[in-house]
Image (tube, rainbow, N blue to C red):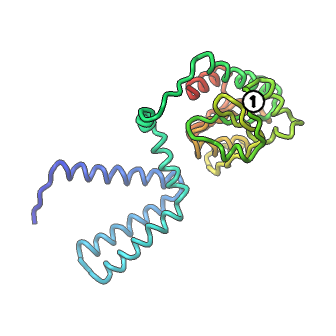
Amino acid sequence: MFFEFGIKDIIDILLVALMLYYLYRLMRESRSLNVFIGIMVFVVIWLFVSQILEMRLLGSILDKLVSVGVIAMIVIFQEDIRKFLYNLGAHQRMRAVARLFSPSRSKDDKTLKSAIMPIVMASMNMSRGKVGALIVIERNLPLDDIVMTGDVIDANINQRLIENIFFKNSPLHDGAMVISKMRVRAAGCILPVSHDLSIPKELGLRHRAALGMSQESDAVAVIVSEETGSISIAMKGELRLRLSAEELESILTREME
């Protein structure tokens, strides 16, 4: 039996293919590819039994399994779904649309530089002395829950303050510093740790915590290695290693605008 096939059907097929492709990528990144393949096989069997063969009894049983399975999948993959929705909302085009409905918060060059240069200079000094440090810079998503895990400071961004907090004998040097709204909000904070297996084994807990923070928020994290003194940065779920002072300043200027 012939049926009409128009432009709307082509768009429908393309959208379904695009959705399946992104689901495939999401499952592959979370190492759940076999689960995804199993779900697709089950869906194909369910459609074949209920729509093509029209087996009412078996079809109704599979319908019930699908309705319960959707809830089970949400519970099992809640972290992956959360990450997917966050990445969708953090996309540049989505962010551009969001800015249309939010007040402008552009920062002038002088204010921006006064906030960035102390971070860069402190990072370079700590790098030369091989002093470990982890500085998290809040962007659009608030980090109040992270701030509450440490000691609230609420001070101006100052090079000497940053270096004193991460001094080896300081009680706050093992945690993370959170910078929000051009101020040092807290220090000694606890960050979520990434369990990504692709992280090089020579990188320590600071790098894993910085990467975990960048995966769960849009924050930028600056890391100074205690072993090598190298400066790295974590943002958008990725690590950039062995940065120079110029590269660090350039990235922070771009991301903090």
Query: In what quadrant of the picture does the C terminus appear?
Result: top right
Specify the farthest residue to the top.
110
**61 shown above or below 85:** below
Which of these two is toward me, 44 or 219?
Answer: 219
Task: Give left or right: position of 257 versus 52.
Answer: right
Q: Position of residue 133 (x, y in %)?
A: 76, 34
Mark 1 surroundings: few (<14), some (14-19) or many (≥20) residues within 10 A: few
Task: Give left or right: position of 100 versus 123.
Answer: left
Tell me the residue that label 1 is attached to: 155
Q: Position of residue 256 (x, y in %)?
A: 58, 28
SS label for mark 1? strand
Q: Residue at x 35, y 49 (%)?
A: 18
Q: Residue at x 33, y 72 (%)?
A: 46
Which of these two is toward me, 140 or 20?
Answer: 140
Task: Give left or right: position of 149 versus 41.
Answer: right
Specify the farthest residue to the bottom.
57
Q: Position of residue 31 (x, y in %)?
A: 54, 56
Q: Residue at x 57, y 18 (%)?
A: 108
Q: Residue at x 41, y 32 (%)?
A: 100
Q: Position of residue 219 (x, y in %)?
A: 60, 37
Name the residue type under label 1: Ala
**241 shown above or below 15:** above
Q: Quadrant of residue 136?
A: top right
**38 shown above or below 113:** below
Query: In what quadrant of the picture does the N terminus appear?
Result: bottom left
**100 shown above or below 52:** above
